[in-house]
Amino acid sequence: MEQKEDKLKEVISHAKEYGYIFPSSEIYDGLAATYDYGQLGAELKNNIKSYWWKAMVQMHENIVGIDSSIFMHPKTWEASGHVDAFNDPLIDNKDSKKRYRADVLIEEHIEKINQKIEKEVEKGFKRFGESFDEVQFRATNPNVLRNAEKMQEIENRMRETLGKNDLEGVHQLISDLEIVCPISGSKNWTEVRQFNLMFSTELGSVAGDASTIYLRPETAQGIFVNFLNVQKSGRMKIPFGIAQIGKAFRNEIVARQFIFRMREFEQMEMQFFVRPGEEMKWYEYWKEARIKWHKALDLGEKNYRFHDHIKLAHYANAAADIEFNFPMGFKELEGIHSRTDYDLKQHEKFSGKKLQYFDPELNENYVPYVVETSVGLDRMFLSVLSASLKNEKLEDGSERVVLKLPAPLAPYKIAIMPLTKKDGLPEKAREIFDALKYDFLCQYDEKDSPGKRYRRQDAIGTPFCVMVDHQTMEDNTVTMRDRDTMLQERIAISDLNSKIASKVDMKFLLNK
Ligand code: GAP
């Protein structure tokens, strides 16, 4: 646990030191759970957006992208169910005065039991080696079976109580499981209450209910209300998707763990409109497509897993998370939801406008079903940053801190350095910089020893460093150093562009 906290602290301090992420309004001591992306953070964020947009929009003939406004007509949120149902069940510990989401406390308890199962399986592996039959072991080992049954029981009770909004039942479950506050260690809990997560504000100068509007808690509704506009103007045929990247706001009860849970964050969402009855096929399709997109980054296959939702959102008939192994452990990175025809039907009801599609093949009108993929951009950022940050021991006994970002996502692709500040080397280095800057974000760096400059570029994740030396002046070659292997090769300046492109082009990720 301590190790995990240390890792998160390391990521936070590295992000600040190198201009990736700063606490917001820091000169006023910051604002809880709000962060600003610095000069390198903004670049990495843009590259992640671009990776997503290319994969979802550019690579799919039947998916288009929009950019809808943050403010929407207040009826939108009545129709979507957010006014009534976008709540978290919260509970306070009276001793530590800390507030928790009741469902998260229970899920964490379930995860602890799951860990016991995994430990038992690990022991089995160790005991039986090659001949270990994991499936058989899981199906027959008494400890595994007992714990699996326990998990199932808790899950059932949680599903039932939350489903019925039985808050006393949720409280009882927490008592029965003897869940203690991680801070005070006590079981001295308040009752469980519901808390709406939407931020509201006043429109114009008129105060009162009629003018209350909300900051959107998800980008998806901007897509639903534009469903017909896009379908008709783009002559889209079902199945088709609408994608968007944008800010969302939630008054999170427990906003913490750096950029993992913020009150202002960005989502990259895609709603895929399908024929009723075909939604489960597409749900499975998008689950696979999305995990493949994540894994193409090579941050470690084992860092991803699916988690099927126990408590379904008010609009979904199936939902799964792609979880990532963050420094704090496995947590939700992306949600894939089968949202049925709930949203479009609700908007039909509240707006009085038909939101239907005429299917020429079936010769009938219907309200399409929707499968949604929704990934948090900030969480994506944290997954990339935390998995890339490495402390390496080198052969000569020294250490280096290196940010092994996937090269297509790295802010600077190349650092161009003159070996010394004289003999025309800086001018030559600038010439190379000027030739490459049209294709790549480059950094010119002439300060300090080459070793120090390499370390600086390692720490910010620049995949390549080019050194201009005296030989360059004679034969127009440079040394190019690879961040990950630290190997240097001598190459012609005229080959630089294609060499770099072959490593940093986004298409290598997209083709995987
Ligand atoms: N439109 C569906 C929707 O909004 P969600 O599971 O509530 O579903 C989708 O959110 C994704 O948005 C999450 O998987 C997560 O990556 C991101 N997200 C949600 N709340 C967040 C928060 N408070 N801070 C950062 N990211 C958040």
Image (tube, rainbow, N blue to C red):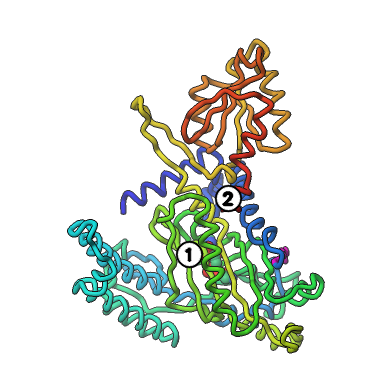
Q: Position of residue 170 (x, y in %)?
A: 37, 81
Residue 246 visible in the snapshot: no
Q: Nearer the viewer, mark 2 or mark 1?
A: 2
| Residue at position x 48%, y 49% in the image | 298
Q: Is residue 60 above or below residue 150?
A: above
Residue 195 can be seen, yes or no: yes
Q: Is residue 480 above or below residue 346?
A: above
Q: Secondary structure at mark 2?
A: helix
Residue in front for this viewpoint, 66 or 263: 66
The residue at which mark 1 appears reads as 322
- Asked if residue 328 lies left or right of residue 68, the reply is left
- Packing grade of label 2 (10 A; few <14, some 14-19, many >=20) is many
Q: Where, by quadrant of the figure, is residue 67 drawn?
A: bottom right
Range covered by the magenta-colored residues? 63-69
Can you give x and y, in whole percent of width and height, for residue 251 in the image?
Answer: 54, 67
In the displayed structure, does residue 96 sit left or right of residue 432?
left
Going by the numbered disc 1, the residue's amino acid type is Ile
Residue at 61% over, 33% down: 414
Q: Which residue is mark 2?
A: 509
Query: Residue 85: horizontal and vertical position, in percent?
Result: 54, 81
Q: Amino acid at mark 2?
A: Leu
Q: Secondary structure at mark 1?
A: strand
- Residue visible at 31% across and 61% down? 183
In the image, taking residue 458 as reference, residue 400 lies left or right, namely left
**Mark 2–mark 1 CB contact (< 8 Å):** no
- How would you rate the neighbour count of disc 1 (Cα within 10 Å): few for under 14, some for 14-19, many for 20 or more? many
Q: Is residue 464 above or below residue 490?
A: below
Cα distance, mark 2 to mark 1? 19 Å
Q: Is residue 284 magenta?
A: no
Q: Quadrant of residue 184?
A: bottom left
Task: Give the farthest residue toward the right.
Answer: 233
